[in-house]
Amino acid sequence: MLTAFIALGTLAGMAFSLALLFLPTLLAKYRNHPNTLPIFLVNLFFGWTFVGWVVALVWACTRPAAPVLYAPVYPIVMAPRHSPAVANSAAVILPLPSPYRGAR
């Protein structure tokens, strides 16, 4: 019976140790950090060192910068004025009224 408690304590200790080791990854996943996969890789390969673990933890705790959105700037091009190819307006077909008509 005592060996069962020792085995259970050992398993609980190992689970706690793994959770503590991957705390930066869990924190990044919880905060929906955009760099969760690179944080996991740093934590996986360098997390066993204290410096790598601290780097991954600081990286997971940083707030990602807001994306800077730039509006495209198009050059201003003035289109030349064009006359209609077909005389379809009444001003082209009919003569302009004279200002002298009807005046005495």
Image (cartoon, grey):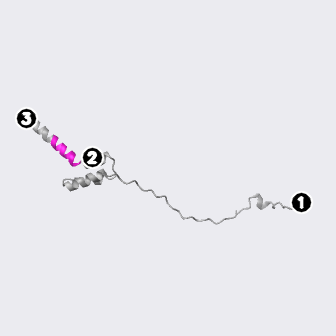
Label 2: how many Cα within 10 Å (few below 14, some 14–19, many 20+): some
Query: Where does the image place residue 25, in percent across and percent down from the top left?
Result: 27, 49
Instruction: State whether the magenta stretch is mostly helix, strand or loop.
Output: helix
Callouts 3 and 1 close, C-beta under 8 Å: no
Label 3's element?
A: helix
Question: Is residue 40 visible in this depiction of the protein?
Answer: no
Q: Of the residues shown, which amino acid type is indicated by label 1?
A: Ala
Query: Where does the image place residue 43, in percent across and percent down from the top left?
Result: 24, 53
Query: Where does the image place residue 78, in percent across and percent down from the top left?
Result: 61, 65
Numbered disc in front, either 1 or 2:
1
Q: Of the residues shown, which amino acid type is indicated by label 3?
A: Leu
Please report whichever mark, 1 or 2, sits nearer to the chain's N-terminal start: 2
Label 2's element?
A: helix
Magenta segment includes 20: yes
Q: Give the range drawn in magenta.
A: 12-22
Q: Which mark is residue 26?
A: 2
Q: Is residue 64 rendered to the left or right of residue 40?
A: right
Query: Where does the image place residue 95, in percent across and percent down from the top left?
Result: 81, 61
Residue in the image at 22% along x and 55% along y: 52
Label 1: how many Cα within 10 Å (few below 14, some 14–19, many 20+): few
State how far apart marks 1 and 2 are (Cα). Answer: 93 Å
According to the picture, the residue beneath numbered tag 3 turns out to be 2
Q: Is residue 97 rendered to the left or right of residue 28?
A: right
Instruction: Name the quarter where the N terminus is drawn.
Output: top left
Callouts 1 and 2 close, C-beta under 8 Å: no
Please report whichever mark, 2 or 3, sits nearer to the chain's N-terminal start: 3
